[in-house]
Image (spheres, grey):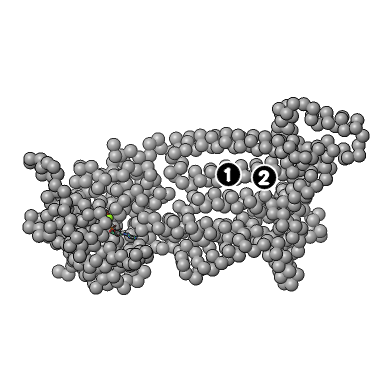
């Protein structure tokens, strides 16, 4: 029969969406379990003795043996894994041998710094990168396209610490447009009660606008720099998705109907290009959330990248594994989010789900 | 009476690695407020001819013509603003493949309303009522549902009818219909042809009807252009199809299956390299 259309209607569309969400959650749970197995095994394989990490190398043999048993290292592997699982789910990742604090507290301290920086950076990268990519595609082969291409190339090849130092030299030391390294000036540090750890959010919620301005002045340069790198990637991908969409027949149909060119570009083509773009933006964001050691070092940013690198160099295994788990969780979470967005944006996927 | 559309020496060229390739090579015809059929085999340049009339030759292709005149407007030099006034509102084209010619992430209703929005000025409720009436006119039984549906939720024939509705809803003066009924079953096809016919006779629309189907074209249209390898090889009154001179046209006619007395084996179409010259 030729009249077969939206069989089922909207309620079952919702049901399908829920079903899809459930399937995704199951996948996430499995992925996370895999991740736990990997971190657990890494913890057993690396040549760092977890007992020595706790007691130091000068403790007597009796202390060593006691701690060995305390850590459960005399039990079979599967039992150790079970204990590990249990600990992870109660938020116990052990103690850092460097800071002598629970890993979870350390992460609660460093992760917001990275999260805040990455979020501002991805906003900059997306808000600039998508229009630039669209513009380059519309002006394919012309000056605008070349400009975007060159900007992107610089974004790929320039070393970030070099750009960071240059940025500090020009915009901080010379022009004094932005604040220097660090997240906030000491003068403002105690004006804000830490709630989320995201200083922009905390200061705004507490109405501390002077502190907000100070935080903004600190974050804008590193965020612009990281945002520039995301922009390079996002604009290049946007350009290629848009070129593909603008060559489709439905674009000609829209032109036949007399739809103005701006609407063809920004509504018809971009709306279709948005579907694969979701994945691109999510991937860039995940990369930023890993934390960039170089940027964090140049800008004295107490974030996740520095923390993990530091822990690695000092063989602080609990901290490294905790950080690895967090990064894994971020990737899994963003993947889940982009899958769901994908489903919302593309009616064809919505149907099949 | 002045013709609605005059095309003289239309040429369309695509650059290829082996140099420019001319896919339409000097097509000329005039169209009044009548039904003109264009037939020809796949790749003979029918669709590209239609697109060029709307100024939509896909880049890097280029279309040139000695004359390309629509109702006194020289289309060769038309500005972007002129095109915006013409397309949709006064000239329109039913695209060949509804599967690829509808925006996959926009509902049929939205795409229909868009044609009205940028075609004629009216309120949203009026436009919606007109769009639904148009869907009903092309034999869609449940217009409300199709209005809300996405293209992938429609069958090929429904997509084709939605496309026809989209292009007719503004009641243009010129309609180019590129294989508009190829996916429709016979009863629906008859109804769609009736709508087209009525628009030509009552509103004085000019119709260019592109098809592979010589039988359909000759029974529906007033005149027929036969294209072969980018050229018009023959122009005939539909009633005079029997008097066709060109061997390609005669060959096409011989391939039409006759009802009485099955011809076996089926005749094959002979081609002569000289026709393409
Ligand atoms: N974008 C393009 N680039 C290069 N060549 C093209 C392009 N579009 C069409 N052509 C060529 O132009 C010629 C005419 O194409 P056209 O689509 O007009 O054929 P048609 O008569 O409509 O065929 P069909 O009956 O299969 O629809 C073909 O040989 C095709 O290969
Ligand atoms: Mg065609």
Q: Do pointers 1 and 2 mark residues of a single chain?
A: yes
Q: Quadrant of ligand 1?
A: bottom left
In front: B223, or B192? Answer: B223
Q: Quadrant of residue A321?
A: top right
Residue A327's disc number: 2
- Residue found 91% across the figure and 39% down from its top: A58
- Residue found 79% across the figure and 29% down from its top: A72
In front: B85, or B34? Answer: B34
Residue B242's spot in the image, x, y percent? 7, 55
Distance in Å between CA atoms under marks 1 and 2:
12 Å
Could you tell me which chain the residue with mark 1 belongs to? A
Residue B41's spot in the image, x, y percent? 22, 54
- Residue found 28% across the figure and 70% down from its top: B64
Ligand 1: does it lie within 8 Å of the C-beta at label 2? Answer: no
Crowd rating for badge 1 (residues with CA inside 10 Å; few <14, some 14–19, many 20+): some
Crowd rating for badge 2 (residues with CA inside 10 Å; few <14, some 14–19, many 20+): some
Asked if one can make out residue A5 in the rendered structure from this viewpoint, the answer is: yes
Residue B195's spot in the image, x, y percent? 21, 51
Residue A224's spot in the image, x, y percent? 65, 61
Q: Could you tell me which secondary element the residue under label 2 belongs to?
A: helix
In front: B49, or A342? Answer: B49
Q: Quadrant of residue A36?
A: top right
Specify the quadrant that holds the N terminus of chain B: bottom left
- Residue found 78% across the figure and 37% down from its top: A94
Residue B235 lies, with reference to residue A195, above or below; the image says below
Residue A294 is left or right of residue B18, and the answer is: right
**Nearer the N terminus, badge 1 or badge 2?**
2
Q: Which residue is mark 1?
A: A335
């Amino acid at each position: 029969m030729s009249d077969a259309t939206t069989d089922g209607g909207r309620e079952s569309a919702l049901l399908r969406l829920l079903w899809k969400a459930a399937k995704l959650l199951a996948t996430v749970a499995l992925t996370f379990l895999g991740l736990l197995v990997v971190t657990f095994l890494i913890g057993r394989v690396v040549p760092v003795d977890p007992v020595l990490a706790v007691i130091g190398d000068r403790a007597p043999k009796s202390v060593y043996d006691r701690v060995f048993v305390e850590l459960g290292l005399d039990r079979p592997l599967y039992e150790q894994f079970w204990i590990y699982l249990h600990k992870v789910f109660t938020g116990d990742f052990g103690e850092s041998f460097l800071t002598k604090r629970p890993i979870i507290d350390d992460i609660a301290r460093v992760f917001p710094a990275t999260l805040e920086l990455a979020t501002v950076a991805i906003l900059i990268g997306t808000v600039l990168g998508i229009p630039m990519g669209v513009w380059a595609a519309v002006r394919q082969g012309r000056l605008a396209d070349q400009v975007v291409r060159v900007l992107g190339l610089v974004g790929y090849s320039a070393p970030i610490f070099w750009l960071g130092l240059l940025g500090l030299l020009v915009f901080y030391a010379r022009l004094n447009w932005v604040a220097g390294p660090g997240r906030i000036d000491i003068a403002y540090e105690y004006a804000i009660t830490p709630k989320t750890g995201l200083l922009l959010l905390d200061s705004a919620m507490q109405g501390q606008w002077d502190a907000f301005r100070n935080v903004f002045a600190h974050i804008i340069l590193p965020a612009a720099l990281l945002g520039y790198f995301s922009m390079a990637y996002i604009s290049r991908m946007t350009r290629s998705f848009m070129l593909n969409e603008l060559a489709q027949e439905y674009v000609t149909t829209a032109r036949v109907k007399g739809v103005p060119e701006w609407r063809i570009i920004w509504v018809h083509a971009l709306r279709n290009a948005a579907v694969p773009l979701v994945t691109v933006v999510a991937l860039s964001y995940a990369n930023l959330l890993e934390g960039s050691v170089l940027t964090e070092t140049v800008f004295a940013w107490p974030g996740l990248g520095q923390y993990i690198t530091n822990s690695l160099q000092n063989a602080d295994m609990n901290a490294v594994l905790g950080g690895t788990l967090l990064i894994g969780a971020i990737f899994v979470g963003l993947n889940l989010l982009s899958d769901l967005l994908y489903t919302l944006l593309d009616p064809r996927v919505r149907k099949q789900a | 009476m002045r013709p609605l559309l005059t095309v003289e020496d239309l040429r369309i060229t695509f650059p290829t690695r082996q140099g420019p390739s001319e896919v339409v090579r000097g097509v000329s015809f005039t169209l009044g407020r009548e039904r003109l059929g264009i037939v020809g085999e796949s790749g003979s340049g029918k669709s590209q001819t239609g697109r060029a009339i709307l100024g939509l030759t896909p880049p890097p292709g280029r279309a040139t013509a000695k004359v390309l005149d629509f109702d006194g407007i020289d289309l060769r030099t038309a500005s972007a603003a002129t095109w915006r006034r013409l397309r949709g509102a006064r000239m329109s084209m039913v695209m060949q493949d509804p599967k690829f010619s509808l925006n996959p992430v926009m509902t049929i209703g939205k795409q229909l309303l868009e044609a009205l929005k940028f075609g004629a000025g009216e309120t949203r409720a009026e436009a919606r009522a007109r769009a639904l009436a148009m869907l009903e006119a092309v034999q869609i039984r449940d217009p409300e549902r199709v209005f809300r549906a996405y293209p992938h939720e429609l069958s090929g024939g429904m997509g084709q009818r939605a496309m026809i509705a989209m292009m007719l809803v503004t009641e243009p003066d010129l309609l180019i219909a590129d294989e508009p009924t190829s996916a429709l079953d016979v009863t629906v096809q008859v109804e769609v042809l009736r709508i087209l016919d009525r628009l030509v006779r009552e509103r004085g629309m000019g119709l260019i009807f592109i098809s592979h189907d010589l039988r359909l074209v000759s029974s529906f249209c007033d005149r027929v252009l036969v294209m072969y390898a980018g050229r018009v090889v023959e122009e005939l009154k539909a009633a005079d199809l029997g008097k066709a001179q060109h061997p390609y046209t005669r060959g096409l006619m011989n391939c039409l299956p006759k009802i009485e007395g099955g011809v076996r084996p089926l005749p094959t179409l002979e081609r002569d390299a000289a026709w393409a010259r």
